[in-house]
Image (spheres, rainbow, N blue to C red):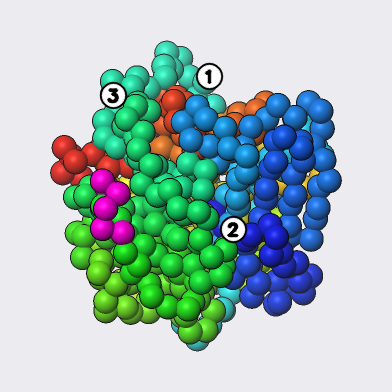
Amino acid sequence: MHRQHVDDLRRVDASPIAAAEQVRSDRVAVRLVTDQNRAEVVAGVRIASLQDGLASSRPVRAARESDWDTFWVMRSRLHPLTILLALVAVSVSCTSNGSVPPHSVGVEQTASTFTAAPSTVESPSDPSSRPGAQAIRLSELSGRVVYDCGDDVCEADIDGSNVQPLTHRSGPEFDPTWSPDGTRVAYRDSRSGINNNDQIYVVNVDGSGRRNLSRTYSNDWGPDWSPDGRLIAFNSSRGFGIRLFVMRPDGSRVRQITDIEAEYPSWAPDARRIAFMSAQPDAHGSDPNYDVFVVNVDGSHLEQLTGWPGEDGWPAWSPNGKWIAFTTTHDAKGRYIGGGPYRDVYIMRPDGTGKRRIVVGLIGAVPVWAPDGRTIMFAGSRLSRPGVTSLWVIRPDGSGLRRLPIRGQDPDWIDPSSSDR
């Protein structure tokens, strides 16, 4: 979710305006060095050492059943799970804080106008308490997944077999997205350092044909391939601030979509609308105020879907277009003592109504729908083992929770045998 090189740190200014600008381009970095049992967090906070009880925790950005010496967290793709790992070093217990009423929406950000959706929430339920609830069987799932496996992009079968690295060069390469036909993967290349001329690359699934689509001196990241294969949406710092753009898969015909801050786009299945997360003017600190928006691909009809305090983002549109899954820090059970927010996964309708929590009892983030729409995959870790992040699946009603035998995060899921994506 958002990264900056640990050795090139920049403090987030305490001023809300300055902080909002920095949040748009800076990344909160977290590096866990297991052999020294320490973690470094940059956002104006430095945690010197891990508690002995957490010394055995492994890095979250790990390949399947493998350990990595370091992991990275981007602040414009804020890997919320890994930030929470470092914060948990100083506070392992949870506190109940009660529900937080939504803040008012519709604050003017630019000359663009938008509609604020009503903030309605359906009561969450614990799927483990439902009679007859059973974990999703691996036999019910099919397809391939690409994901972050350390500082590289890997692909694997949904059951965790046939793992293949798609990138292997020195430096971070992550944020993958499938082409609709499953023959190519676009991803973020940060080999020069996070927020140091980040580029969007594309590579064939056999590792050949790698090439740079961005070819600019700006920072480009968050690619998402349109369902019809004609465009790639992404966010970029070219011009003024971070905005939403689209381009053809060969890197041509680049066009700006939004006039407000925009990150991590997700296409509607009809390829006519794009959901994304946007930093509000008061976005700063460990739980910056981001909200989910949707916009037509021509830039019209901008609509705000969330309005809770804190971070709502990483939207993912369901294949039938009826739901959007997203990550949020809005949680009735409160936050970890000493700082970090508790992140989980909600779903809502594309007009912002019907918000419902589906992930309970886990730290969860960055959802993606199964091609058939029957399940949702996300990166998650148990509260008792926040240093071990795996890919999980759950049904949209919150039942069937199952951990997949894949260590990593930021997944994208495709099934070439399915007509839906």
* CA separation in Å, label 1 and label 2: 37 Å
Measured as percent of width and height from the top left, residue 353 is found at 44, 52
Q: Label 2 belongs to which residue?
A: 3
* CA separation in Å, label 1 and label 3: 22 Å
Closer to the camera in the image, 30 or 359: 30
**Left or right of residue 204: residue 289:** right
Rate crowding at label 2 as few (under 14), some (14 to 19) or many (20 or more) other CA atoms within 10 Å. many
Q: Is residue 271 magenta?
A: no
**In the rendered structure, are the residues bearing label 3 and label 2 in contact, judged by CB atoms less than 8 Å apart?**
no
**Left or right of residue 304: residue 107:** right
Rate crowding at label 1 as few (under 14), some (14 to 19) or many (20 or more) other CA atoms within 10 Å. few
Q: Label 3 belongs to which residue?
A: 140
Of the residues shown, which amino acid type is indicated by label 3?
Glu
Of the residues shown, which amino acid type is indicated by label 2?
Arg
- Mark toward the viewer: 3 or 2: 2
**Left or right of residue 203: residue 334:** right
Q: Is residue 170 visible?
A: yes
Q: Label 1 belongs to which residue?
A: 129
